Amino acid sequence: MTTTAVETRTGSGTVRLPGAWGLGLGRGALEIKQFFRQRDQVVFTFAFPVVFLFLFASIFSDDVKGAGITASQLYVPAMMAAGIMSTSFQSLGISIAIERDEKVLRRLRGTPMPPAAYFLGKIWLVLFTGLLETAILLLVGTSFYDVDLPSDATHWFDLAWIFVLGLTACALLGIAISSVPKSGKSATSVVVLPFLVLQFISGVYIAIDTIPDWMLNIGALFPLKWMCQGLRGVFLPDSARILEQTGSWELGKVALVLGAWCVGGLALCLLTFRWKNRRDG
Amino acid sequence: MGGMTTHANELAVDVRGLRKQYGDVTAVDGIDLEIRPGEVFGLLGPNGAGKSTTVEILQGKRSRDAGEVSVLGSDPAAGTRAWRSRVGIVWQDESAPAELTVGETVRHFARYYPRPRDPEEVIGLVGLQAKAGSRIKALSGGQRRRLDVALGVIGGPELLLLDEPTTGFDPAARRQFWELIRLLADEGTTILLTTHYLEEAEALADRLAVVARGRVAATGEPAALRERYGTDATVEWTEADGTIRTERTDTPTRTVAELMHRFDGEIPGLRVSRPTLEDVYLRLTGQEDAR
């Protein structure tokens, strides 16, 4: 045993604490490592949208009447939107609830880690997994289901901002909902149920023109419906617009609603985020 | 010796009139503590005596209802990052990210601190070299506790707060842990540990506070406590009819002399014993009948 550390603890009283940005990068790398080591997480949040795209797009492949597209094509943007929400909302909602329940958060709070580093790490995780998920779905969609990559810069730009705004809004909502479950064990059901319902009423599993209007209107209160709609605008021909409620992609409204959810989600997070479980008061 | 960045005459921990209530239950009912820099201080008491609540308040993790608390010169409730970098915490039933390895976790936590210890050295100190590459989920309970200790000391803290650090350790691991605490104490780290193991408190602590029902029943060096609260002795002998008699007295010599006179020579089954620290502890915490 050695006693070499004595000198390192003497010295001046002012100490430079490590910065949040650098620590955030470090935490991001760690989060990504952890994510891919948890097989159930990878299957649950990552493989699900891919498997569902394969199932739905292969089962329903007929032409959609009067829209000039096939049902398979319809499922590609829908599953991309669901994939973005899965890697952000579902992944964060469940993992943060578990981290809180298992007191990983409380331990972090006891270190000089700046809270911003924790959230930066989560952002890197969500950005990384979200991009990878979207890329995989895009690859599957363009290879097997007749979807083309965006044809021009405008469409690429639309894809980029829908991705960023949708991912941000859903990530913030995921952080917010992580405070709802009482324990890590109940986290999955608390997070997955609303996500599943939203997927049904936002036009992910079922084509938008078959969902009753009142259901769609409820779905329209949340980001997923608008992410689906925006992505259809990016990947489907203009002839498919007749399927929409208003006969238009409404990209301006998509940006507005997603932007509003980013602001509202941030406020919700700031109001509700807790480092410890309710029991640890 | 003593904390180098703490003023020599300033207390590392200064607690006055600390109170904490959970609903109708009073967990801490007016505790005072003074811990000097460089000291190993033991908070000893039965389960539910208020030890953990006290330590959690010192760690800044729990709010208090009343009282003044100063830890390294700051109120823990307003602990800044700089303050947290000087305080090491080892929690009771703590968990770490299960999918990471021991090495990854310790190295990562080192990055949070301005002047961390060498991660490989710390892993060695807690005896986890052989497990450095193992995932945390594959560790045994005792190994996890040692990782908790590693994460508590990785920042090179001036003050280390340990809440029942050796619960669940086997005897060998406990001895090894004691060595680690002594090493840290030799380096000048101030250490506060709670325990309900009397031998642990006696082996490690320079001074003890015995806590019962949310109050400090006694404070002092272990030997001084025994002398102050254990001045009496117990004399035990066997009567002619075979019944064993005991008598607690402040004057054991006189009792033995009287017995010698009665038995006229050797006293059957004679035993004179001074109270152990355990006896004193059980008296102070009102658990004497539990023996």
Image: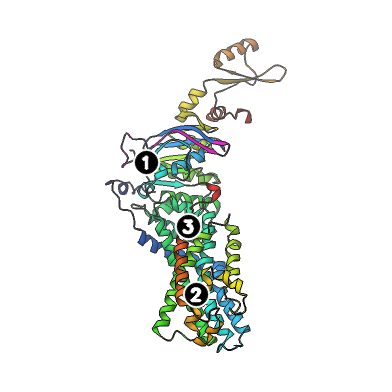
Q: Which one is nearer the viewer's eye here, B18 or B36?
A: B18
Q: Could you say whether the residue bearing mark 3 is in a helix, strand or loop?
A: helix
Amino acid at dot 2: Glu
Residue at image point 45% right, 61% down: A266
Amino acid at dot 1: Ser
Which quadrant would the C terminus of chain B be assigned to in this image? top right
Inter-mark Cα distance, 3 to 2: 37 Å
Q: Could you say whether the residue bearing mark 2 is in a helix, strand or loop?
A: helix
Tell me if residue B4 comes above or below residue B252 in the rendering. below
Q: Which one is nearer the viewer's eye here, B86 or A127?
A: A127
Q: Which mark is residue B130?
A: 3
Residue located beneath label 2 in the image: A133
* Mark whose residue sits in front, 3 or 2: 2
Q: Which one is nearer the viewer's eye here, A13 or A134?
A: A134
Residue located beneath label 1 in the image: B74
Q: Residues within 10 Å of mark 1 (few under 14, many from 20)?
A: some
Inter-mark Cα distance, 1 to 2: 47 Å
Q: Which residues are magenta?
A: B1-26
Residue at image point 52% right, 23% down: B230
Residue B119 rendering spot, x and y as whole percentages? 39, 55
Tell me if residue A107 comes above or below residue A122 in the rendering. above
Same chain shared by disc 3 and disc 2: no
The single residue placed furthest to the left in the displayed view is A12
Q: Residues within 10 Å of mark 2 (few under 14, many from 20)?
A: many
